[in-house]
Image: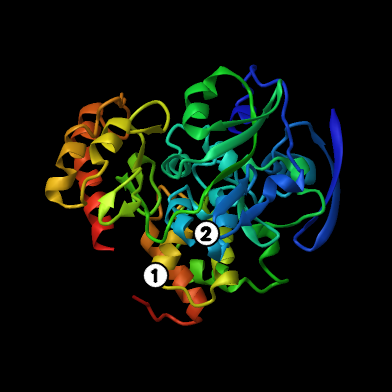
Amino acid sequence: MRAVNEADPAIETIVRSTDPSFLNIAVSSGRVELGGGVTMAAILAERELAFLHPVARAVGSPALREAATVGGNLFAIRGDFATALLALDATVMFAGGFGQRELSLDEFMSRRERGAALVSAVAFKRPPDAALRFAKVTRIHPEGMSVLSIAVQLPLTSGRVTGARIAYAGMAPMPLRAKAAERALEGRTLDAAGIAPALAVAADGTSPADDAIASAWWRREILPIHLRRLLLGANQA
Amino acid sequence: MKTPIQFRLNGEDVATFADGGANLLDVLRESVGDLSVKGGCWQGTCGSCTVLIDGAPRLSCLTLAESCAGRSIETVAGLRRGPDLHPLQSAFMERFAAQCGYCTPGMLMAAKALLDRNPNPTRQDVVEALAGNICRCTGYEPIIAAVLDAAGGDSRRRA
């Protein structure tokens, strides 16, 4: 709508997605599926999705959350919700000029600039209680654009991390996974010594920008600090 | 191409024509003639165009007008009942919560959305409800105080 209001000549078609399937929320014990048109407000109204409420609440203002959708967030510069979906290892179902397709969100993100796609739904395995942790660093409270956001999912087996997922917003032109930090965390315990190797490579693969919110230098400096808090906080839960 | 749309505006049926891609803000102001809705940024940043759609706060500048067919829309023009101001309007007046007044329609509608759902908000609830509404001259303190006054019906300040 913003681009339409600004009369962006590149906009030739507006797709008004009114199919009820776009608004579908399906939560079972093992799996969650969210239609591409599900709003942040709808997620906040769904008790079964309490683990996503801190993330949905981080998006915009109350009025914006009534309009901001799951599908739309996958195309946002600082997609806070998309960052959590990356940490949840979500799959994206979308329709393009080539029919219905499915891709991991990770792969979808790396291709998102390459063509138009209508996101019909995202799906992911429901995380164990308290396994998903999210932090948004912002200069203005309660609503401000993120300096950066971090989402982590930390499945533990006998106190050791197996299959960690770490994702950032604000550290690259689009949300991305911190694969070096994920690997460094594999098999480690969530204490200061266990997480040190992951913190050392926290910024690997990132390319933060200098912008009006913060400098790239500042983002690199504060990233390990907030990641450390998030990882150690998960241990206390 | 123009598309016919019908919706309820402040309790009355309205029928109008909207250009393809027109936003609700422009349709309300230019086609329907409700000038109580103010456009600030046209990009969902300032909150001055906030209206209620089926009771929920929405940014009318980011809302496709066609998507409002059959919905119930409330703007600040529908707040007063005859000569009586809405309690929020009275509280804004008493607390000097409007200086230039440009953000006030959006502030009032965001506050109404809060009080309709939560008649007894805390100060933090009010701050969060108004987080998307930017004021550049009155200052937020009188506005927060006014909303708390309207909720309480007196001048008690809640923590």
Q: Which mark is residue B123?
A: 1
Residue under the point 58% across and 36% down: A92
Dot 2 amino acid type: Leu
What chain letter is assigned to the residue under label 1? Answer: B
When the figure is inspected, residue B151 is found, relative to residue B124, above or below; the finding is: below
- When the figure is inspected, residue B158 is found, relative to residue A153, above or below; the finding is below
In the displayed structure image, the side of residue A33 where residue B77 appears, left or right = right
Tags 1 and 2 on a common chain: no
* Residue plotted at (13% across, 49% down): A192
The chain under label 2 reads: A
Residue at 52%, 35% (x, y): give it.
A74
Residue B2, image quadrant? top right
Quadrant of image for the N terminus of chain A: top right
**Looking at the rendering, which quadrant does residue A83 occupy?**
top left
> Which is more toward the observer, B92 or A111?
A111
Element under label 2?
helix
- Give the SS element for disc 1: helix
Mark 1 to mark 2 CA distance (whole Å): 26 Å
Report if residue A151 is visible in the image: yes
The residue drawn where x is 52% and y is 28% is: A108
Q: Amino acid at mark 1?
A: Arg
- Does residue A2 appear left or right of residue B10 in this picture? left
**What residue is shown with label 2?**
A49
